[in-house]
């Protein structure tokens, strides 16, 4: 598995965080970082995405939400966020920061 | 792939609504072209009356402006009337020669006003009332002229008359029948309506037939002459004598028409490439002239145009509301009664209130409301659902706020509330916000309003009020969903009932299988349907279907309650509310060791530790050494007990040990929603058993069992189920009732709503009367709960489960 899923928009270095198998399908893991928690999601198709673990609505931890398609539903008030863009799904309006992640040889790398 | 071409003839509410539904299902399937005879985008025709009355302006009633067509890649030919359909070459031709080819054609040509063959009907100043042009002509006439005559005292005629009166004209309504709106009202309500319209200055001539419109010197109409010779002055005549389906185009193309374009249950005409929706259609012999059925038709037509092919339209029950500000009239179904029907009537002449419900076999089949229509949505829902009203008969006239599930905030009449009134207490949504969203975003359904404003999307207690606001804002366009037909979520058209049945009858064992079999539209569902499916699978096939933690809400995945700051709370189980010094010592130690900020006693007689970081949860559980209290689950929560005859001088039964036994029997029981029990040792009922899902009350001669109580959003007193002699019987009945609920309840439906839906008699039959059924239910519950493993211990002992709680480092 060599798919680079996120666009390279920052120059942060890639850091290994876990094996792909360590994240449940349609689930997530939390990565502690200096700039706040990061939620790393795995879809049913084994795509991996990373978002700031803070819902733009009232700051709920997105990592704890239910993942479906390329979306996660915030556990606090049910906002849906697009995993690939960080955009809230209409009619809600908001944006959540995204991070670059990639999977190489079953290992997940995060650039944050 | 080349896209198919879809042409819509008729740029009105039914046709464009069909396109909107189609774009939701298959946005890229068609290149779409729309022909509209009027030179506008799509507007809400129902709101022409408020425009005429000067209460709204034209831009406010636009539903789809020209940008909408452009944004959705739709070609709009506004102001071009289609005059020919060439079914052989599959193209339509407009008056100006514009041609468009189609692969599929949708006809939504609406209706035309019926113009009786009265001499003088072509005179200047004689109008029908149908579209924006008519409305503008009437507004113009009102500025220059004085006398208006409206022919027809039906819904549309009265709205026109009221509007013209408000515009300053002297208005006389001429009506053929003996009372107004005779197709919607009985004579009593019609007389009341007439009196209040007369008080506003309108004049009525009933039982009169028009002979001719008389031409004046200017060439314009100047009077209306009746068959009996009476002549009244008229500078403006509005003919509102009903509408006829506009089938001219379809007939000229050789499509089968019979008082409307004849369609089948998929809205297909006799030409399989041509569909038709709206007022132009005759479905099972009925042409609907109200908007709600048209929207239902649009949804079905869209489903077939999108090649889904699963929806059917089987006709609509319709209701009518008069849109005259300050006069509330509602009518639905068979309002005249007679035959096998009976009536409940409330008539308060002084207060101007009249309510009549027509009832057949304990079901509402018709209703007329005048003066107080606050409960119209409720009656209409009861009528459409065919609900047995036997139990609530005595309360029907008093209204839903005194009985149903509207909750504490459904009291006021929506229209009278100020904009600043907080409607939804959970999400802080005021009436003004809701009204604004409805108007600006063109919302028609409760679901739309929930999505856009969040009102009534949390606890739901304000649902009734939000529906009333919706109804009063959009008038007759309000679509009420039939609760029994409501799909599980946007991922499917299947109802909870259908999903449960399919899982049971086709032995579906996984979420993926269920979604495939039931043709889910999304690859892996959403946060609404996945938890429901997961519950249905494991409750139907215990020990066979595998639980899917990723389809559970976080609380059930983390076995703790998530709090607003992302920390969790932990409630260890205390059987029957009993604890020991040793447990209390351990709880105290844990609270200190993990610096737990809040320790609270719960309403369910246990101790809540709040503010625990997720990563600390397994450590907390290991140190507590107590089983999970499941305070977080759609499952058995607690069994609250009073002291009972063990200590109490009044106690008649041992309520504490009974509570412990019940809680141990039910330990680990998942259910559609949370389940709370209580056991009291005597009728003083200190354990508050009267507001629990199952309340057991000890009496000297045995145990009384009450079910379906609720102390939450709206307090519901539990209903008496039965009385038994022994403790074993009480436990068996409790288990059987809860298993029935587990097997038949819809996900997130509390026992109170489940029992309201299926009826207490149904429950009694299975749990009290039929001993075999009771035993089987009891056995099935015990089988499902066999070998249940404490989730906290699993998380402590199994590394793979523990992983859920451990953060990663970058």
Image (cartoon, coloured by chain):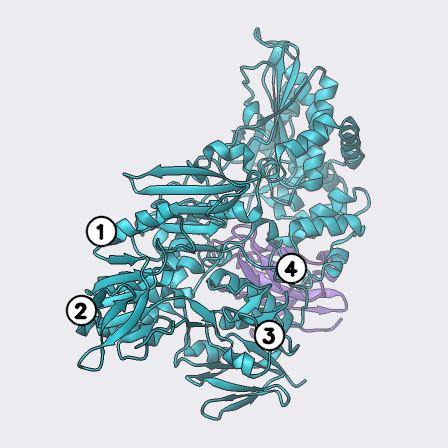
Chain colours: A purple, B cyan
For the C terminus of chain B, the quadrant is bottom right
Q: Label 3, on which residue?
A: B275
Q: CA distance from mark 4 to mark 2?
A: 56 Å
Find out whether the residues at labels 2 and 3 contact each other: C-beta distance under 8 Å: no
Q: Residue at x 47, y 51 (%)?
A: B332
Q: Label 4, on which residue?
A: B492
Tag shown at residue B278: none
Horizontal placement of B444 versus B753: left or right? left
Q: Label 1, on which residue?
A: B199
Mark found first going from the N terminus, 1 or 4: 1
Mark found first going from the N terminus, 3 or 4: 3
Q: CA distance from mark 3 to mark 4?
A: 23 Å
Tag shown at residue B146: 2
- Confirm whether residue A89 shows in the render: no
Find out whether the residues at labels 1 and 2 contact each other: C-beta distance under 8 Å: no
Asked if labels 1 and 4 share a chain, the reply is yes
């Amino acid at each position: 598995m060599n798919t680079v899923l996120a666009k390279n928009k920052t120059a942060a270095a890639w850091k290994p965080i876990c094996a792909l198998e360590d994240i449940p399908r349609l689930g997530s893991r939390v990565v502690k970082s200096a700039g706040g928690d990061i939620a790393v999601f795995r879809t049913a198709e084994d795509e991996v995405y990373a978002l700031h673990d803070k819902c733009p609505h009232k700051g709920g931890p997105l990592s704890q939400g239910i993942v479906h398609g390329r979306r996660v539903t915030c556990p606090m008030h049910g906002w849906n966020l697009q995993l690939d863009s960080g955009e809230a799904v209409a009619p809600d309006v908001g944006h959540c920061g995204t991070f670059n992640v990639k999977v190489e040889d079953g290992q997940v790398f995060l650039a944050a | 792939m080349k896209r198919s071409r879809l042409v819509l003839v008729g740029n009105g509410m039914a046709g464009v609504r069909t396109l909107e539904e189609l774009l939701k299902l298959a946005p890229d399937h068609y290149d779409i072209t729309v022909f509209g005879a009027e030179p506008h985008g799509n507007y809400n025709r129902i709101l022409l009356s408020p425009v005429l009355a000067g209460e709204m302006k034209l831009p406010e009633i636009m539903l789809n402006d020209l940008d909408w067509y452009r944004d959705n890649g739709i070609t709009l030919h506004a102001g071009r009337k289609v005059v020919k359909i060439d079914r052989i070459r599959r193209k339509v031709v407009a008056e100006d020669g514009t041609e468009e080819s189609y692969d599929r054609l949708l006809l939504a040509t609406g209706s035309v006003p019926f113009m009786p063959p009265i001499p003088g009907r072509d005179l200047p100043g004689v109008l029908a009332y149908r579209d924006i042009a008519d409305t503008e002509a009437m507004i113009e006439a009102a500025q220059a002229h004085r006398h208006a005559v409206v022919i027809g005292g039906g819904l549309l005629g009265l709205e026109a008359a009221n509007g013209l009166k408000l515009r300053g004209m002297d208005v006389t309504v001429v009506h053929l029948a003996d009372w107004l709106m005779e197709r919607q009202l009985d004579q009593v309500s019609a007389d009341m309506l007439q009196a209040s319209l007369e008080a506003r200055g309108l004049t009525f001539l009933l039982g009169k037939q028009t002979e001719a419109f008389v031409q004046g010197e200017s060439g314009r109409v100047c009077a209306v002459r009746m068959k009996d010779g009476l002549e009244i002055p008229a500078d403006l005549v509005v003919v509102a004598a009903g509408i006829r389906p506009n089938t001219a185009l379809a007939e000229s193309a050789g499509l089968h028409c019979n008082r409307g374009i004849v369609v089948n249950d998929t809205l297909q005409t006799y030409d399989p490439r041509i569909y038709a929706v709206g007022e132009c259609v005759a479905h099972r012999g009925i042409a609907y002239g109200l908007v709600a059925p048209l929207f239902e038709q649009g949804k079905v037509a869209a489903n077939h145009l999108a090649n889904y092919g699963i929806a059917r339209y089987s006709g609509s029950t319709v209701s009518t509301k008069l849109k005259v500000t300050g006069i509330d009239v509602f009518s639905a179904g068979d309002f005249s009664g007679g035959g096998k029907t009976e009536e409940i009537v409330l008539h308060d002449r002084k207060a101007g209130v009249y309510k009549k419900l027509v009832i057949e076999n304990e079901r509402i089949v018709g209703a007329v409301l005048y003066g107080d229509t606050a409960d119209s949505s409720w009656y209409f829902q009861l009528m459409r659902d065919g609900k047995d009203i036997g139990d609530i008969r005595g309360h029907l006239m008093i209204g839903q706020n005194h009985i149903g599930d509207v909750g504490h905030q459904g009291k006021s009449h929506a229209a009278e509330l100020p904009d600043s009134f907080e409607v939804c207490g959970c999400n802080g949504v005021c009436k003004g916000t809701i009204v604004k969203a409805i108007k600006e975003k063109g919302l028609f359904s409760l679901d739309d309003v929930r999505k856009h404003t969040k009102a009534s999307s949390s606890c739901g207690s304000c649902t009734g009020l939000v529906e009333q606001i919706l109804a009063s804002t959009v008038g007759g366009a309000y679509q009420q969903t039939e609760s029994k037909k409501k799909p599980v979520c946007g991922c499917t058209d299947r109802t909870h009932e259908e999903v449960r049945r399919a899982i049971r009858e086709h032995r579906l064992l996984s979420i993926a299988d269920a979604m495939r079999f039931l043709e889910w539209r999304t690859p892996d569902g959403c946060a609404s349907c996945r938890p429901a499916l997961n519950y249905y699978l494991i409750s139907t096939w215990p020990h066979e279907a595998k639980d899917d933690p990723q389809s559970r809400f976080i609380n059930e995945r983390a076995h703790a309650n998530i709090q607003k700051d992302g920390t969790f709370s932990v409630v260890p189980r205390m059987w029957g509310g009993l604890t020991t010094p040793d447990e209390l010592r351990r709880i105290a130690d844990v609270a200190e060791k993990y610096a737990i900020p809040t320790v609270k006693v719960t309403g369910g007689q246990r101790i809540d530790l709040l503010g625990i970081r997720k990563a600390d949860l397994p450590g907390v559980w290991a140190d507590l050494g107590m089983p999970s209290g499941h305070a977080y689950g759609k499952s058995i929560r607690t069994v609250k007990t009073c002291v009972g005859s063990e200590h109490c001088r009044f106690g008649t039964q041992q309520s504490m040990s009974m509570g412990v036994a019940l809680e141990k029997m039910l330990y680990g029981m998942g259910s559609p929603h949370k389940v709370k029990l209580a056991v009291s040792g005597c009728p003083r009922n200190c354990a508050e058993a009267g507001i629990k899902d199952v309340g057991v009350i000890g009496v000297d001669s045995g145990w009384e069992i009450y079910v379906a109580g609720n102390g939450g959003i709206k307090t519901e007193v539990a209903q008496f189920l039965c009385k038994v002699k022994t403790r074993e019987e009480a436990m068996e009945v409790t288990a059987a009732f809860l298993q029935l609920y587990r097997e038949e309840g819809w996900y997130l439906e509390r026992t109170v709503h489940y029992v309201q839906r299926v009826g207490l008699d149904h429950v009694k039959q299975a749990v009290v009367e039929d001993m075999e059924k009771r035993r089987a239910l009891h056995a099935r519950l015990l089988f499902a709960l066999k070998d249940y493993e404490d989730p906290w211990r699993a998380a402590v002992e199994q590394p793979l489960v523990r992983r859920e709680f451990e953060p990663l480092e970058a």
